[in-house]
Amino acid sequence: MNIATNSLKNLKRRKMRTILAILGITLGVMLITSLLTVMDGLQSSIAESLRLLSGNLIIQEKGAIDQTLSIVNTSLIETLQSNKDVEVISPEIYVARTLKGEAGPRFVTLIGITDSYGEIVSPGYIKTGSYFHENESGKILLGSKMADRLGLKVGENLTIDSTKFSVTGIFETNTIADAVIALIPIEDARALRNLSQDQVSVIEVKPIDPEKADEIRLYIESNFEEYEVVFPEDLVSEATEILSTMRSAIWIVSAIAVLIGGIGIANAMLMSVIERTPEIGLLKATGWRNIDVGLSVLIESLGIGLIGCSIGLLLGIVAAQMAQNMIPALMVRLTLATILESLVFGVGLSVVSGIYPAVKASRLSPIEAIRGE
Amino acid sequence: MKTYRRGESIVRALRGVNLRIKTGEFLSIIGPSGSGKTTLLNLLGALDLPTSGKVFLDGVDLTQIPEGKLYEVRRNKVGFVFQHFYLIPTLTAIENVLVPVIPMKNNTRFKNRAKELFSIIGLDERMNHKPNQLSGGEQQRVAICRALINNPEVLFCDEITGELDSATGEKIIGLLKEINQREAVTVVFVTHDPNVSSKSNRIITLKDGKITSDNYVGAKGK
């Protein structure tokens, strides 16, 4: 037996006290891990969104807060066709609907698309099945998370506003779109919203050269007062900034939780040292050095930290996963950085919490300690 | 000399004690409580240092050893047994005996020595029992083994029969005598009971921090 094994054995002496100390750290680490995992998931979802949408412009009604509320006239298409910087023009009609699913109603945004949509968003994202043609009425493309929720596979049907739609394909982008977006032919969308022939929600444009995007925007906004141009990237970078701030806030809150756990450890260790004062006196009387005694206490707090962190880490991952199961739009991502950060912080704090009790124990004089009974 | 501070007052525990102990002696220190016997033992056993004066162990002046190095004396030169046993309740008897060597490197070599000691004290079958499964006398014997694990030159015992009945106490003193002869360990034990001290070869009487008598018992001359 050496000091380390002896110390770990000591943890079993007051089981309840050890368990409570471990619990403190476990909860703190679980909090950090689960929250960071959710944050990283959101961040990665946003990064993927960027990849998905970058380079494109959306022309919408000026001041429209949501694409489903915007109306753009199709006469704009002709103007765009004569613009030499424009490569792809994709008119789209957005429809907000609620679908009945196995686990209750789900809000979805249906995007009515034309064949040119496939040039804006690559067909590579389609996992099974394929795009439909714009003149094929009653077809639908679902996001993978939505398909799971509704329990639908390629070839099966679903009903929206008493119209039957047949699933031609399922896409997976690893963004929130997988849970809330479905694509239908533009004329079906027009029927659902009762728009006239010359109306669409937005027109999405892909420039020949990404550098020309700003020029196109300038052109539209100066010639058409009723329209504005939105870059999806701008929305995304705004969200990224918000997330970054949130991540710092989460870190601080979780760190406080872990700190409280550390106080629990310090308390447990201190009580342990005080209780075992005569025993420590005896150890010194038999030739244990100050540093042997101090190390012994530190190793005990290290033991608590390691156990607490491991369990906390596992529970944190499970909690994040459970959150994702309950909220399909949520993406979670466990990174090595999160694991390392949680472990280092949790274990580090545990050891630091043991320092004062360790020093106190190491300084006890043998006869005072023994007499102290 | 040894003085303590206890709150506002100064306690003169030992005043002017001069003592010489030869290798292999089996002696007792007797006196009423407050006479300074435990203090004297602690000074001899390197658990404490005198306020003034010197303590020589095997030719080495303990007062000249830096505090950080005193552990070497406690580990290798002396062994201590206390009235209250101080066995660790969650360890087995043999694990308790090995406690002093836990911080040492390559300490598995002490296992045989521990088993040997258990034979000497006659507790072979109780090696793996926990302290709460042992009687008071058995626990004290385990404590004695623990004090001997590192082959000390001197064994110091502080009122070790204090918590035991007289029959068991006698057996323990008998064991000490055996150890003194077999293991060639100098034994110094402190007691307030004349029946116990009469078993030793030399009795030193302490009163109010001073030695009042120092006699050899039996046929041994000075």
Image (cartoon, coloured by chain):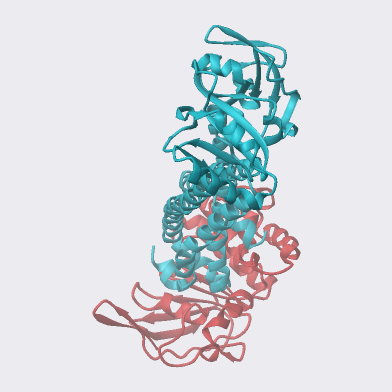
Chain colours: A cyan, B red
Measuring from the top left, give residue B93's x and y in whole percent. 62, 53
Residue shown at the point (66%, 71%) measured from the top left: B150
Measuring from the top left, give residue A27's x and y in whole percent. 48, 44
Closer-to-camera residue (B98/B143): B98
Measuring from the top left, give residue A191's x and y in whole percent. 54, 14
Closer-to-camera residue (A129/A330): A129
Considering only vertical position in the picture, is B6 above or below B64? above
Relative side of B197 to A156, left or right: left
The answer to whether residue A264 is visible is: yes
Residue shown at the point (47%, 56%) measured from the top left: B164
Measuring from the top left, give residue A42's x and y in whole percent. 56, 42
Considering only vertical position in the picture, is A308 above or below B222? above
Residue shown at the point (44%, 87%) measured from the top left: B50
Closer-to-camera residue (A109/B112): A109
Residue shown at the point (49%, 70%) measured from the top left: A362
Considering only vertical position in the picture, is A169 above or below B159? above
Q: Quadrant of the N terminus of chain A?
A: bottom right
